[in-house]
Amino acid sequence: MNQISIFKDKELLTHFALVIQKEREIISEVVSYVSELLKRKLYLEQGYCNLYSFLIEKYGYSGGAAYRRIQGAKVA
């Protein structure tokens, strides 16, 4: 049974807000890591010609998700 389905409406909305906050914190942390990978060019050591390919092929990101994280890392 899906645990989410047991929440009452107000509880569902409260938990959803908390999960969104966690998601934002995690994405922020991921972008920090991507920034450091970019600085160190560790994707080259792993046999990838660029960070974009590294994120897609090794970690299964979609093209759009990889692009957004790399752009965020460049801004950060």
Image (tube, rainbow, N blue to C red):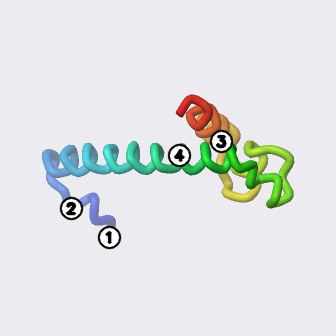
What amino acid does circle 3 point to? Ala
Q: CA distance from mark 1 to mark 4?
A: 36 Å
| Residue marked by disc 2 | 6
Residue at the far top: name it.
75
At a point 75% along the width and 49% down the height, the residue shown is 41
- The residue closer to the viewer here, 32 or 19, is 32
Residue 52: % across, % down: 74, 43
At a point 64% along the width and 38% down the height, the residue shown is 70
Dot 1 or dot 2, earlier in sequence = 1
For residue 58, the mark is: none
Please state, as top left, top right, bottom left or bottom right, where the N terminus lies in the image.
bottom left
When asked about the image quadrant of residue 28, the answer is top left
For label 4, count other residues whose C-alpha is less than 10 Å away and answer few (under 14), some (14-19) or many (20+). Answer: some
Dot 2 or dot 3, earlier in sequence = 2
| Residue marked by disc 1 | 1
For residue 32, the mark is: 4
Secondary structure under the numbered disc 3 in the rendered image: helix
Dot 1 or dot 4, earlier in sequence = 1
Q: CA distance from mark 4 to mark 2?
A: 36 Å
